[in-house]
């Protein structure tokens, strides 16, 4: 190599390192709307754990939480009341304060120059808004116009598993039954569960305890999540149908869901029955799922090994087990899928979207 060539190589290397340094040192002003909630608290944890490059963190909630101190990366930060002026200088806004707040404030944040990743259902089915699960449809993010929607928790953990099976064998129909934790309905639902459990342990009556869920949840299961629609499904059930088709970009996949609340604190479980066009043996499906991003197979029934909500809590993957043939149809599979609804079902998926953005 001539002296000139080696000088050029040195310059190129320098330029490359310099660029990398710029990327590594670029930090972002991030707002969390609903920072005091179940999902908001998880946002704070996940951003820190994944070393998201945060310059400033702005924690926003209702007036009730104004002045409350929350820790981010070991430092105390004061919660501010959400107002129309909350987004000055913010580059990424993570919303998890309910649909009404997202409808009203996401456009305000976008106008102030932020990209919004929204956890509520407010924007999910808007054709202008991408609905993204990074393992499934990362390219959809390119179409965003300021708002990117995070799907429903029970949909996210399901599509991470459906996508590789669809790619291999084309899914015709899915029948899903969910077993959803109380944290999926926010902190007040978890409070209801604990109060009922404590009262029962003391031999007290449970009917005086304030209910945010439609019925007593301790020692019970409730086949009612979100409101009933004219077709007698709940809105949660129809979210699983409509959002799955949008994320998978395939309206031909037929889906029917029954969503049930169970007295578990964290992690949703789902029994999936899948009918495919091409035959997939349970062994082939297992092999495919073992290699799929965001999925972890735990399936050894001889040793009593299958995914459990209690083990999935605090972890990232969609865990799959009980993989077996549906012997009542020609090309059918049954699976059991469990994932932490506050992480992959909400905060982790949204932070992964923010990572794609930067
Ligand atoms: N939980 C899940 O598994 C899950 C999964 C996916 C998506 N989501 C969605 O995420 C959102 C939040 O759920 P969550 O479970 O975290 O609920 P949550 O525990 O009840 O928390 C609600 C949050 O919203 C804030 N908030 C309420 N009213 C407000 C207002 N007027 N102005 C500003 N902030 C307000 C609350 O602040 P205060 O503490 O001040 O009241 C709190 O920080 C919902 O849209 C939900 O559908 C939840």
Image (cartoon, rainbow, N blue to C red):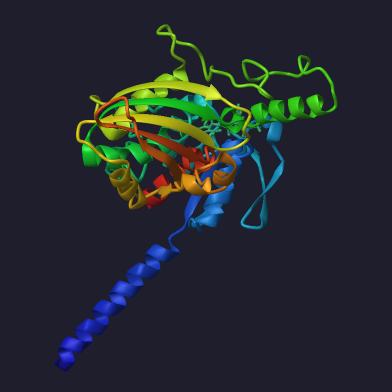
Q: In which quarter of the image is the N terminus?
A: bottom left
Q: Where is residue 293 in the image (x, y as percent from the top left)?
A: 36, 50
Comparing 57 with 244, the one in front is 244
Q: In this view, does 330 lie above or below 116?
A: above
Comparing 253 with 55, the one in front is 253
Number of numbered discs on residues: 0
Can residue 215 be seen?
A: yes
Q: In this view, does 73 lie above or below 38?
A: below
Comparing 62 with 156, the one in front is 156
Image-based side of 17 in relation to 153, left or right? left
Q: Position of residue 160 (x, y in %)?
A: 37, 41
Q: Residue furthest front?
A: 302
Q: Is residue 60 above or below residue 288?
A: above
The residue at the point 49 percent across, 30 percent down is 105
Q: Residue furthest left?
A: 2
**Ligand 1 location (quadrant):** top right
Can residue 115 be seen?
A: no
Give residue 214's quadrant in the image. top right
The residue at the point 20 percent across, 31 percent down is 277
Q: Where is residue 123 in the image (x, y as percent from the top left)?
A: 40, 27
Q: Position of residue 137 (x, y in %)?
A: 30, 41
The residue at the point 76 percent across, 27 percent down is 195
Q: Residue furthest top?
A: 230
Q: In this view, does 312 lie above or below 199?
A: below
The residue at the point 54 percent across, 29 percent down is 180
Comparing 52 with 344, the one in front is 344
């Amino acid at each position: 190599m001539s002296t000139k060539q080696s000088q050029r190589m040195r310059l190129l290397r320098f330029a490359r390192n310099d660029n990398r340094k710029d990327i590594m040192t670029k930090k972002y002003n991030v707002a969390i709307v609903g920072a005091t909630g179940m999902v908001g608290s998880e946002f704070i944890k996940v951003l820190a754990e994944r070393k998201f490059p945060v310059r400033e963190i702005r924690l926003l909630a209702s007036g009730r939480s104004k002045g409350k101190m929350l820790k981010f990366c070991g430092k105390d930060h004061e919660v501010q009341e959400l107002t129309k002026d909350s987004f000055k200088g913010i580059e990424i806004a993570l919303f998890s304060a309910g649909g009404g707040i997202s409808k009203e404030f996401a456009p305000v944040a976008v106008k102030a120059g932020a990209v919004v990743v929204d956890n509520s259902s407010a924007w999910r089915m808007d054709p202008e808004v991408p609905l993204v699960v990074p393992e499934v449809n990362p390219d959809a993010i390119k179409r965003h116009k300021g708002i990117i929607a995070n799907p429903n928790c029970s949909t996210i953990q399901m599509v991470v598993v459906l996508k590789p099976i669809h790619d291999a064998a084309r899914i015709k129909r899915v029948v899903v039954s969910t077993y959803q934790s109380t944290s999926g309905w926010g902190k007040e639902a978890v409070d209801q569960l604990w109060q009922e459990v404590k009262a029962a342990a003391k031999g007290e009556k449970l009917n005086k305890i304030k209910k945010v869920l439609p019925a007593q949840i301790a020692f019970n299961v409730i086949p009612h999540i979100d409101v009933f629609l004219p077709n007698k499904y709940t809105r949660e059930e129809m979210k699983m149908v409509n959002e799955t088709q949008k994320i998978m970009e395939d309206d031909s996949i037929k889906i029917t869901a029954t969503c049930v609340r169970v007295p578990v604190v964290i992690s949703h479980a789902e029994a999936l029955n899948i009918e495919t066009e091409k035959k997939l043996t349970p062994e082939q499906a297992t092999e495919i799922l073992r290699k799929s991003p965001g999925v972890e197979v735990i399936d050894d029934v001889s040793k009593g090994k299958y995914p459990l909500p209690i083990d999935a809590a605090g972890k990232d993957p969609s865990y799959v087990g009980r993989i077996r043939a549906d012997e009542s149809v020609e090309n059918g599979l049954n699976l059991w899928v469990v994932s932490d609804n506050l992480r992959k079902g909400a905060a982790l998926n949204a932070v992964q979207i923010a990572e794609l953005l930067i």
